[in-house]
Amino acid sequence: MVRSMTGFGRSTLDLESYSLTCEMKAVNHRYLDVTFHLPQSFTYLEDVLKKVVKQTINRGKLYITITINPLNDSGIKIEPNWAFLDQYMALFRSLKTRYHLSQEIKVNDLLQHPDALIVTNKEDDLDEVESAVIKVVQESLDHLVDMRKTEGKQLALDLYDRLQTIKSSILEIEELAPQVTLQYESRLRKRVQDYLNHSDVEVDEARLLNEIALFADKSNIDEELTRLNSHTKQFKEILMKDEPIGRKLDFLIQEMQREINTIGSKGNDERISVLVISIKSEIEKCREQIQNIE
């Protein structure tokens, strides 16, 4: 199933003394790149959480934020992170002075930052805390993947439509290609005959046929059309695979671009040139869509 690389996931888990919330946003990226924004008390879990993410996500840049909200004061201790807050306020004042800003910062704005408070667990077992964080991250990943799949279906439908347009244009080129040499022969014979009408020289049929054969060889695009058809078929087959396919499609679209460029340079026919331009346009649109696929 095609999966987009963009998406959003959110999950909340209520424990006895506090509530955990995980939000994650994913955007396009060539590889997997995960950035965590965790409360200071959870930073030691970053490596564990990266492994959890890698089990589900293969490509994309992920921004993952975990926040903690106390439900009562029985199990946690909350203190201001003075080192962070002092630096934050110093930076804010410097920005106000430098850029002549008038607005004031609000306490709520400060507390929204995950590093503003230091939350320590008085009695909670570390294994229980780790399990809870992993659970809320996994649930968010599930929501993220669902959104990626939904967007992926739309990408797949668009790509199928474009592949069908490409296939139709290829069929037209296949019908036109055999006519190119015949039309060249007709034009060449006419030009030669028009020239010889004013002289006593006879047509050298052997040389004429040799010239036609050379043209036919140089303008032959059968191999390129065969490979382009094969690439189009492979493209559709890859779209049906239940695995990360973005890189495979990216490579395949480059091969399709190479073949159509060659067809364009060898076609020697205005009608084929128009179809080549149409195929190139569709290939480029496919390339843009592929950048969104995991």
Image: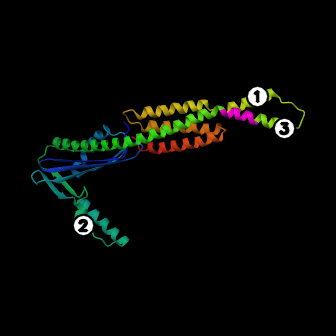
Label 2 vs label 1: CA separation? 88 Å
Dot 2 lies on which element? loop
User: Is residue 185 inside the magenta stretch?
Assistant: yes
Dot 1 lies on which element? helix
Q: Residue 170 occupies which quadrant of the picture?
A: top right
Number of numbered labels in the structure image: 3
Residue 219 in view of the camera: no
- Badge nearest the viewer, 2 or 1: 1
Query: Where does the image place residue 285, in percent across and percent down from the top left?
Result: 49, 45
Label 1 vs label 3: CA separation? 17 Å
Residue 106, numbered label = 2
Query: Where does the image place residue 281, in percent across and percent down from the top left?
Result: 53, 44
- Nearest the viewer among 245 and 127 is 245
Dot 3 lies on which element? helix
Horizontal relation, residue 158 to residue 194: left or right: left
The crowd level at tag 3 (other Cα within 10 Å; few <14, some 14-19, many 20+) is: few
* Circle 3 residue: 195
- Nearest the viewer among 158 and 200 is 200
Q: Earlier in the sequence, mark 1 or mark 3?
A: 3
- Nearest the viewer among 159 and 145 is 159
* Circle 1 residue: 209
> What is the three-letter code of the residue carrying label 2?
Lys
Which span is picked out in magenta? 179-187
User: Is residue 88 inside the magenta stretch?
Assistant: no
Label 3 vs label 2: CA separation? 91 Å
- Badge nearest the viewer, 1 or 3: 3
